[in-house]
Image: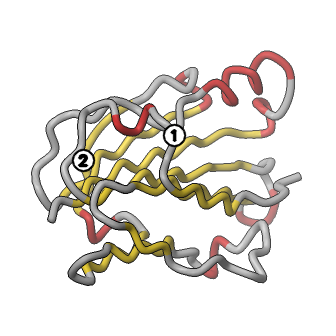
């Protein structure tokens, strides 16, 4: 069965926490048109504050995406990983894995806050959005509403 993955990584600093910059950040897409991606790879998109949150596409091997994908025969088991090093905001109660039937897809979002070594620079932030479909898909699938939405975003003051 086909597995399609789109990983959108949006990153910013305190400069985009309010005003026009925050409006641009909040307008950044959480789903984009799919390009042709070889089997075993994910469509990887980065959007940076210093680039005006314009999408920059590339590809990543599925083993590099930070999500566990397991084909269970009639379902796809999906579970996003959170590295203990990147524990802010705290996530004391993680949701269970999602099991997708053919034709379904999940949007899983996680956010993070980081400080530079020794606190010399200000905080930086990122949002990971994983769009994962089980079965054949159209290029515009991730522009629609997901079958399942998992929002693990927490406060990042």
- How far across and down, in percent of the image, does residue 137 sit? 24, 44
Position of 123 with respect to 11 (left or right) is right
- Residue 117 lies, with reference to residue 47, above or below; the image says below
- Residue 50 lies, with reference to residue 31, above or below; the image says above
Callout 1: helix, strand or loop? loop
- Which residue sits at x=66%, y=39%? 12
- The residue that mark 2 highlights is 59
- How far across and down, in percent of the image, does residue 95 sit? 64, 76
Callout 2: helix, strand or loop? strand
- Which residue sits at x=30%, y=54%? 103
Measure the C-alpha gap from mark 2 to mark 1. Answer: 23 Å
Foreground of the two, 106 or 26? 106
Res 84 → quadrant: bottom right
Position of 103 with respect to 68 (left or right) is left
- Residue 151 lies, with reference to residue 92, above or below; the image says above
- How far across and down, in percent of the image, does residue 146 sit? 49, 47
- The residue that mark 1 highlights is 145
Foreground of the two, 59 or 67? 67
- How far across and down, in percent of the image, does residue 68 sit? 38, 76
Q: Quadrant of the N terminus?
A: bottom left
Res 76 → quadrant: bottom left
Position of 121 with respect to 138 (left or right) is right
Labels 2, 1: front one = 1
Foreground of the two, 114 or 53? 53
């Amino acid at each position: 069965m086909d597995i399609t993955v789109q990983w959108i990584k949006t990153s910013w600093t305190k400069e985009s926490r309010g005003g026009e910059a925050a409006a641009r950040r909040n307008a950044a897409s959480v789903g984009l048109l799919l390009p042709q991606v070889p089997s075993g790879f994910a469509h990887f998109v980065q959007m940076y504050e210093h680039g005006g949150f314009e999408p920059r596409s590339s590809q990543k091997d599925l083993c590099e995406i930070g999500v566990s994908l397991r084909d269970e025969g009639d379902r796809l088991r999906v579970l996003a990983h959170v590295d203990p090093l990147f524990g802010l905001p705290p996530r004391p109660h993680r949701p269970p894995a999602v099991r997708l039937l053919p034709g379904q897809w999940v949007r899983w979002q996680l956010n993070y806050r980081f400080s530079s070594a020794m606190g010399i620079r200000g905080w930086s932030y990122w949002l990971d959005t994983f769009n994962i479909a089980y079965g054949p898909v159209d290029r515009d699938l991730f522009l629609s509403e997901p079958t399942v939405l998992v929002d693990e975003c927490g406060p990042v003051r």
